[in-house]
Amino acid sequence: MSNIAYFPKPHIDQRPGKRERTKTANRQAILDAAREVFGELGYDAATVRDIIRRTGLASGTFYNYYKSKEEVFEALADDGARRFRPLLRAESEKATDFESFVRGAILAYFNFVANEQEAWRLDRPPGEPLPHARSTPEVVAVFDEVREAFARVLAREHAPPVDLDYLTTACIAVAREIGEKMLERRPVDTQGAADFAVKLILGGLPALPRL
Amino acid sequence: MSNIAYFPKPHIDQRPGKRERTKTANRQAILDAAREVFGELGYDAATVRDIIRRTGLASGTFYNYYKSKEEVFEALADDGARRFRPLLRAESEKATDFESFVRGAILAYFNFVANEQEAWRLDRPPGEPLPHARSTPEVVAVFDEVREAFARVLAREHAPPVDLDYLTTACIAVAREIGEKMLERRPVDTQGAADFAVKLILGGLPALPRL
DNA sequence: CCACGATCATGACGGGGCGTCACGATCGCC
DNA sequence: GGCGATCGTGACGCCCCGTCATGATCGTGG
């Protein structure tokens, strides 16, 4: 009755069938190709066929996975947000107060975008920046998670109630834009940028680091 | 020798020739049509021919004035920035200190965008937001003007030197994003939004208005 | 081991927007 | 009033888009 010595089926046992595997492989290949193409040509100049050509697949195949260039871009943004979310959650769990959460979250975000840039935006033409994705599901989820974390940590330290929506919006705006400016400076100083953003949020102009 | 009673030329004397007049009229007509079309169809769905059709001009005429849909959009953004700049300058001139300038400038900006929205975004589909223009000449000029004003007013009150580029970036980011969120609320409360943004910039979280 | 059905890659095709260009009308000017 | 320059015009070729009929491949039940 022992089945240790026997391989009942000649093929190695991989959970997903081949069908399913090539499916996810193709989806990922298209995503990777899109990253490259957007990076090299810029979003506007990029073409569905530029993307699919790089995968070796046929043009029609693209539409089996995504409806349009816009959708594949949103999938890309979703992917980034999905990978960042665990980092954000970790910060919100280890944070003891509002300050430590904001500092941890912003630093984590700055390191994240710096790594992303380094990882696949190596060769970027000076041209137009990629569009911002605000409404994609995962990005909205990040927004919500920040607001929830704010609510939790502010309640814990009995802070007076403020307009959470505005606060979240403002903090994300500051992080996003300072983060972008940070990437244009050499060397990229995530610590310094985070310090500036955190101090602005926590104490406004008087608290800002001096030069 | 008196030429009071005589009209030496039968046509009324207007400074620019007819050539020049239809030129600026066409340029303006295209701009107005683009505003409408972007508002109704959204930026992505809009077509050069959608825009030019609304003016009654021929398709080729569009390209005598703008190179592409992108360029006409940038001209639109430039137009907005150009009309806002005097308001900003007025605030920077009447401001006595950093606080009064920030408050005046942000309130002016919020009132400006609220009016713009009311003026020509009456019928907007729930769809995607218009893209943001960061690099158009006039928009850059606004950025520079804010930074200059910051530098002036901070020097006047002997404030310690800070990272002006980051500060300007952060303030504009806050104003832009809070402004956008403000427009989604009914009724649109420019005073409340400005109060929030100003207090965040001047004093951070502890200074925020309480609910 | 085999056939049948389902799934999916393929690339050719029609549709449509883009940008150009040669033509003609209009304007400024002498 | 005539000439040259300027600019409106719309047809044209080009390219990209999204679809679809076809065939290949995989899973499955006999």
Image: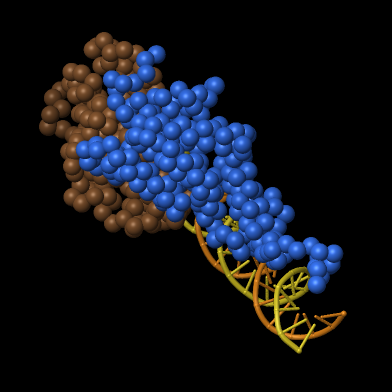
Chain colours: A blue, B brown, C orange, D yellow
Tell me, yes or no, if residue B90 can be seen here: no
Residue B157 visible from this viewpoint: yes
Residue lying at 63% horizontally and 34% vertically, measured from the top left: A123
Q: Residue at x 44, y 48 (%)?
A: A139
Residue B141 x, y percent position in the rendering: 36, 27
Quarter of the image with the N terminus of chain B in it: top left
Quadrant in which the C terminus of chain B appears: top left
Picture quadrant of residue B133: top left
Q: In this view, does D30 lie above or below B37?
A: below
Q: Closest to the observer: A148 or D21?
A: A148
How far from the left and from the top, in percent, is residue C13?
A: 66, 69
Residue that appears at 17% across and 21% down: B94
How many numbered callouts?
0
Q: Report whether A22 appears left or right of A177.
A: right
Judged left or right of residue B171, residue B115 is left
Where in the figure is residue B26, as x and y percent of width and height? 36, 45
Residue drawn at (20%, 47%), measured in percent from left and top? B188
| Quadrant of the image occupied by residue B172 | top left
In the figure, residue A203 lies in which quadrant?
top left
Image coordinates of residue A104 in percent, x first then y, are 43, 33
Q: Please indicate whether residue B68 sits to the left or right of residue B172 in the image.
A: right
Q: Which of B26 and A23 is in front in this view?
A: A23
